[in-house]
Structure formats: C-alpha cells, structure tokens
C-alpha cells in the first residue's frame, strides 16, 4: 500500500507540473492564443498514462515503444508538457510554442525525435490511425500497446464510428481509447450541438469494453487502465472531466477553449495550482 500511495502521489505531482507547463506555454504564445481548457482537462489522464502505462525509452524513436495518439490535437499543450517532463523537449523549446520556426505548433506536427508520433488535429482521424498501428502490432506478434485520446465533441465525426466498428471487428485488445468527456466543444456544449445520449451503452453495443470514471481521480484512472490490460477486447475509458480543471477561473468556461492568457490570470492560476 505504501508503494501504491507513493505512485499516486508521484502522478499527482506530474499532473501539477503538466498544468504549470501549459500555463508557461500559453503565456508565451501571447496574441497567438492557446487551447487551454481541453488541455487542462486531460492533465490527470496524460500524467497517469506516461507515469505508469506507456512504455517509452530515452530514445523516442525506439521501435519497442507504445504509441500515444492525441486525436484531439488542439489540446497539444498537454502533449508538449508531458514530452518536456520525460525529457524529449527542453525547457527552451517549450517556450517557443507558436513562435516562428518552432517545432511546437498549435496542433501536433509529427516529429519522432521529439516524441510527437503523428500530425493530428483534423478531428475524427486519430482512432483510424490507432487502429492501423494496433492491427500491425498484432500481425507482427509484438506486445506494444496503442493509446488514443479523443474529445467527446470529436465523436460528432462519422469516421469515428467506422473506426469503432473496425477495432471491434479486428479484436484489437492492444488498443485503449480514452474519451475526454468534458461536455464542451469549440462553439458550445455538446448537448446544445449534438447529444450523445448514453455513450457507454452505445459503445458497448459495438462490442467494446467500456467504463465511465471520474477523469480527475488518479486512483480511478490508474485502476481502470490496469484492468484494461487483462481484457481481450478494445477498451474505452470514458473520462468524465471538467474543461479547464485545475484553476477555478478556467473551469467550465468555454471561452478558454482558445483564448489569450494575460499575465494577471497567469499569476492567479500559478497561486491556485501551487497551493494544491
């Protein structure tokens, strides 16, 4: 139990560092603005994945690695933040976000030397990419796993549902799908734009194994992903999250989907996050 408690605390610390990195990058972006809300909602999930589940090495191009695909590419700040924490991106590079000639753009652009697996951001494409990789791993009889993070607004795309059928058909039990269910998309709430109704029931009907959890409970994220390793089906984690989670000024305020971060708000957010 002591070892488990230590692990959970390490993940919490990592999640805090991710949010602090996001703030730094958003501030440096200045008038270019940044997608903060959907990055903050993913911090706890991404911290848990990279701390305890994704197999990576000092060499980001090591072929014996798991694959992480951020299908909701506009949340790239969380991706760049974790790549900095594991040593693939430097502090100096982190602060070039959205600058001329930077490798860190407003959506991820493939750069294996820096751990960026694929160019993403055209919503609805990430799961199809993940399916292809997972299928190739099974054909090659290798044990690598594939983790893909999607947004709940992204589920409006028809290509997602073709991909859901495909991963079930090919029995891709080396694939984990994580849905950041924060209830919002760019122009409003999901309920206003296109309701999903009972998402868990819908996904289970595709012959996927699905669980809904609190997407900010490190314990629940950890235990669910651990369970998924033993299930012989493609697995979906529906993470019920709060957009902007981590700073009360961002939470459930969809203006922070993409907005300029001022120095004053940056300083207020630093104070609140560092109190945790």
Image (cartoon, rainbow, N blue to C red):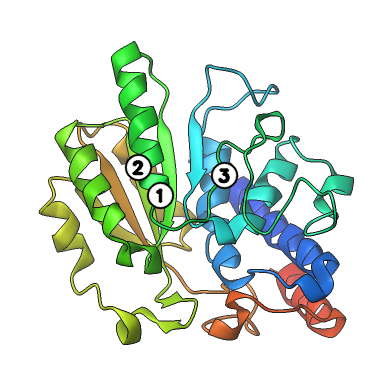
Q: Label 2, on which residue?
A: 128
Residue 80 in the image: x percent, y percent?
Answer: 69, 49
Residue 135 in the image: x percent, y percent?
Answer: 30, 26
Whether residues under marks 2 and 3 lie with C-beta atoms below 8 angstroms apart, the answer is: no
Secondary structure at badge 3 equals loop
Q: Earlier in the sequence, mark 2 or mark 3?
A: 3
Point 81% across, 63% down: residue: 24
The correct choice, above or below, for 135 with respect to 51 in the image is above
Whether residues under marks 1 and 3 lie with C-beta atoms below 8 angstroms apart, the answer is: no
Whether residues under marks 1 and 2 lie with C-beta atoms below 8 angstroms apart, the answer is: yes
Residue 194 in the image: x percent, y percent?
Answer: 29, 78
Point 12% across, 45% down: residue: 207
Q: Label 3, on which residue?
A: 119
Point 57% across, 61% down: residue: 74
Q: Earlier in the sequence, mark 1 or mark 3?
A: 3
Left or right of 90? Residue 244 is: left
Q: Is residue 53 visible?
A: no
Quarter in which the C terminus is drawn:
bottom right
The correct choice, above or below, for 106 with respect to 196 in the image is above
Residue 39: quarter of image: bottom right
Badge 2, how many Cα within 10 Å: few under 14, some, many 20+? Answer: many
Q: Distance of mark 1 from mark 3, alpha carbons? A: 10 Å
Badge 3, how many Cα within 10 Å: few under 14, some, many 20+? Answer: some
Q: Label 1, on which residue?
A: 125
């Amino acid at each position: 139990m002591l070892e488990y408690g230590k692990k959970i605390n390490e993940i919490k610390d990592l999640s805090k560092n991710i949010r602090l990195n996001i703030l730094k990058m958003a501030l440096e972006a200045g008038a270019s603005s940044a997608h903060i809300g959907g990055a903050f909602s993913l911090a706890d999930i991404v911290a848990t994945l990279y701390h305890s589940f994704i197999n990576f090495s000092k060499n980001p191009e090591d072929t014996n690695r798991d694959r992480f695909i951020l299908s909701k590419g506009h949340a790239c700040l969380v991706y760049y933040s974790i790549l900095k924490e594991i040593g693939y991106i430097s502090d100096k590079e982190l602060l070039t976000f959205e600058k001329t000639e930077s490798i860190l753009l407003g959506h991820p652009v493939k750069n294996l030397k820096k751990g960026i697996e694929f160019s993403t951001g055209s919503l609805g494409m990430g799961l199809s990419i993940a399916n292809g990789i997972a299928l190739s791993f099974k054909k090659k009889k290798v044990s690598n796993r594939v983790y893909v993070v999607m947004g709940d607004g992204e589920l409006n795309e028809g290509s997602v549902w073709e991909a859901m059928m495909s991963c079930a058909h090919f029995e891709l039990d080396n694939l984990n799908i994580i849905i950041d269910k924060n209830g919002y998309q760019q122009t409003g709430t999901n309920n206003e734009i296109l309701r999903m109704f009972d998402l868990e029931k819908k996904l289970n009907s595709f012959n996927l194994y699905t669980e809904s959890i609190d997407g900010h409970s490190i314990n629940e994220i950890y235990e669910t992903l651990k369970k998924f390793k033993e299930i012989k089906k493609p697995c979906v984690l529906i993470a019920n999250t709060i957009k902007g989670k981590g700073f009360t000024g961002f939470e459930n305020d969809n203006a922070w989907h993409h907005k300029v971060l001022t120095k004053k708000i940056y300083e207020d957010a630093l104070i609140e996050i560092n109190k945790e």
